[in-house]
Amino acid sequence: MKNYLVLGAGTVGTLLATRLAELGHNVAVASRSGSTARGAKALQIDAADAVAVSSASAGVDTIFLATSPTQYHRWESLWPPMFTAAIEAARTSQAKLVMVGNLYAYGENTTMPMTETSPLLTNETKGLVRKAGWELAREATARGEIRAAEVRASDYFGPGAGKHAQLGSGFFAPVLRGKSVKVFGDPDVAHSWTYLEDIVSTLIAASDHAGNWGRAWHVPTNAPLTRTHIANQVNRLTGRHASLEPYSSALLRTLGVFSPSIRAANDSAYQVNKPFILDSSDTESLLGVQPTPWDDALATTVDWYRQNA
């Protein structure tokens, strides 16, 4: 039995805490709201409060930084104190630090597919924030102060994925009803989609890694698919005739003038307007985690939205 602290009670944090508790471990979930997960202890803590996070980390084997601020236009102010607090907590407690990451830091000009060793070439604000946070953790690891790793996933889908996910409730709920669905970006470009349960499996495997730390892992992910292909696959499962239509670029630019959140999303629109492909072969080989077969993951997801949409 191990002791874990999960910072963040969003979609990934809650699933992770639940899985760890089901495995018989002692788990605490820290969030500003004090939300909990089944079998875990709830702590009302701001992940940006270094003193509180360090106090909660005493006696912990691994800290998972799973916070997920959805106010993209505020990442520059929201993320740095959370990175600093988690790193300081790992330093003082000597707990391992596993960070839930994404692919923003690779940037628009990276070569596809993105691998665990691809250079971080971003010049976009959100990517620069994520890059800076990871470099702080990696440098602290290189100095021997902590053991940190980052688990990077592409856009996720699966039971519980909400309205902020590209393949979340805003996609599956109307597709299941056979509606015409407005989507952000080109629905006909290939994209890697990461299953939520596979993110959890990779986080746990990374925390148990006996080799070198200070590195990134890619969540094992199936072959890339277009959203049009996925909608058509759901149509075949349901007998419906849903279709997809992208929001016009002109409309999004106009809305971005008035909405800082949409403007921030527009800055990374290359992710859904060009092929965005993840390679996870290194992680699959070294951690022994495999992606859930696509058809199984999609069927489980469709069943969940049928019951919960």
Image: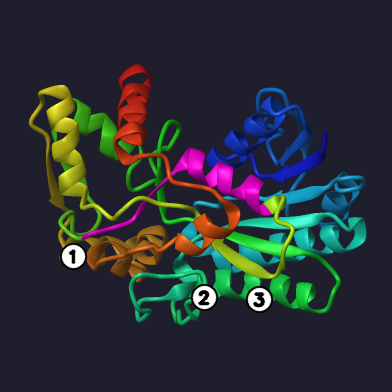
> Can residue 178 be seen in the rendering of this structure?
no
Question: Residue 106, located in which quarter of the rendered image?
Answer: bottom left
Question: Residues under labels 3 and 2: Cα distance?
Answer: 14 Å
Pick out the residue farthest to the left.
Answer: 241
Disc on the earlier residue, 1 or 3 = 3
Question: Residues under labels 1 and 3: Cα distance?
Answer: 33 Å
- Mark 1 = which residue? 249
Residue 31 horizontal/vertical position (percent): 70, 41
Which residue is found at the position 87% from the left and 53% from the top? 54
Q: State the extent of the magenta-drawn residues as a range.
A: 190-206
- The disc placed on residue 270 is none
- As drawn, 228 above or below 105: above
Disc on the earlier residue, 1 or 2 = 2
- As drawn, 166 above or below 186: above
Q: How is the image coloured?
A: rainbow
- Mark 2 = which residue? 117
